[in-house]
Image (cartoon, rainbow, N blue to C red):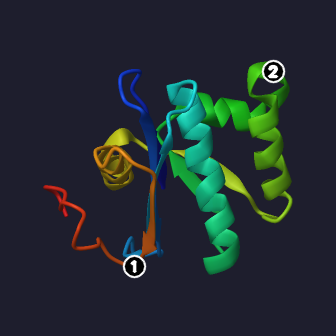
Amino acid sequence: MLDGSWTDSDRFSGCGWVWMDSGENIQLMGTQSFTRCESALHSEVEALRWPMENMLQHSLCQSFGTDCEELIAMIKEPHEWPSFASELEKIETLQICFPDFKIIHVPRVRNQFSDFLAKTVRTFRRELLFIGCSIPVWLPRPSQA
């Protein structure tokens, strides 16, 4: 599962993702902040691209979940989103490496941990990247974890 975070007042956007096994146990997670994207939807696209790259290295995962229905629409009909052509081209190139690629909608309530990672990393107000199996000590704990 993945999520992007963006506000027009912050200098940084954030993304977070969690890879879970079939028992919904966290196997790997990532969080990253980067110079603010043009829009919230640009942050969501980045929030898909980055975990796709990581899953190629760390997992056989073929399915990606998001609570952003616009992102799903973009992936399914990229020609209808010409202003995102370069970003979607990167996603399409990555999709070639996933023979059974799926992007599915998950309710926001099931995506809270990715949302937490994406929002929290922005609060550091600098570029930051973390990939690991558990929450690092320097990252605040979410209330539900």
Q: Quadrant of residue 63?
A: bottom right
Task: Check whether the beta carbons of the residues at disc 2 and disc 1 lie within 8 A of each other.
Answer: no
Mark 2 surroundings: few (<14), some (14-19) or many (≥20) residues within 10 A: few
Left or right of residue 125, residue 2 in this image: right
Disc 1 secondary structure class: loop
**Residue 5 visible from this viewpoint:** no
Q: Position of residue 80 (x, y in %)?
A: 80, 20
What residue sits 85% from the left and 25% below the top? 79
Which of the pair 18/132 is nearer the observer? Answer: 132
Left or right of residue 32, residue 93 in this image: right
Left or right of residue 21, residue 38 in this image: right
Disc 2 secondary structure class: helix
Left or right of residue 94, residue 28 in this image: left
What residue sits 62% from the left and 40% below the top? 45
Residue kind at label 1, given as amino acid type: Cys
Residue kind at label 2, given as amino acid type: Pro
Which of the pair 144/107 is nearer the observer? Answer: 144
Which of the pair 75/116 is nearer the observer? Answer: 116
What residue sits 77% from the left and 38% below the top? 88
Q: Quadrant of residue 39?
A: top right
Looking at the picture, does residue 128 appear above or below residue 19? Answer: above
**Residue 21 visible from this viewpoint:** yes
The circle on residue 82 is: 2
Q: Position of residue 25 (x, y in %)?
A: 37, 75
In the displayed image of the protein, which residue is found farthest to the front?
Answer: 126
Q: Label 1, on which residue?
A: 133
Mark 1 surroundings: few (<14), some (14-19) or many (≥20) residues within 10 A: few
Work out how far the residue at label 2 is from the one at label 1, CA to CA, in angstroms: 37 Å
